[in-house]
Image: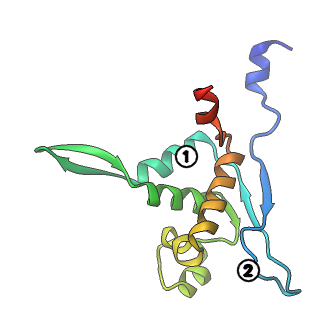
Amino acid sequence: MSALSAFLNPTVTTEEKELIVSKRFLDEKGKPAPFRIRSLTQEENSACSKAATRNIKVNGGYQEKVNQNEYISRIIVAATLEPDFASAEVCEHFGTKDPIQVPGKMLLAGEFAKLSAAILELSGFEQNLGDEAKN
């Protein structure tokens, strides 16, 4: 197999994983309900980043700035298969029509961080890249 063939035919395109984000979410049997997440492509990541980018006025000009909280919320909504943050029932339960607001209303800060970290890791972001660069 040539090197080009390896790049044209990756073994896995999307990975899925279940994880327990919190003991607060219990299933019918009283056990912690897992969140089901998937990896994101760079195209999906870019769409999340672009949607969370705003032009802000700086020194008489405009500069693009990514709202990090919105960006991470968008990633969570895009990559979480269960629960479906975009479902009308979930949005209504949390008092919003915007699915991007649901993770912030539903999750505690640590749960939000745990879920986003798992999605980023599954999508190929290394958690310790900064540590390796220092060494």
Which residue is under mark 1? Answer: 45
Q: Residue furthest front?
A: 135
- For label 2, the SS is loop
Q: Residue at x 66, y 61 (%)?
A: 115
Tell me: 7 left or right of 40: right
Residue 56's place in the image compared with 19, above or below, is above
Q: Amino acid at mark 2?
A: Phe
Residue 51 location (% of width, % of height): 42, 53
Which residue is under mark 2? Answer: 25
Q: Amino acid at mark 1?
A: Asn
Q: Quadrant of the N terminus?
A: top right
- For label 1, the SS is helix
Q: For residue 52, which quarter of the picture?
A: bottom left
Relative to the observer, which residue lies in front, 14 or 36?
36
> Label 1, label 2: how many angstroms apart (C-alpha)?
27 Å
Q: For residue 132, which quarter of the picture?
A: top right
Q: Residue at x 67, y 45 (%)?
A: 123
Q: For residue 113, which quarter of the picture?
A: bottom right
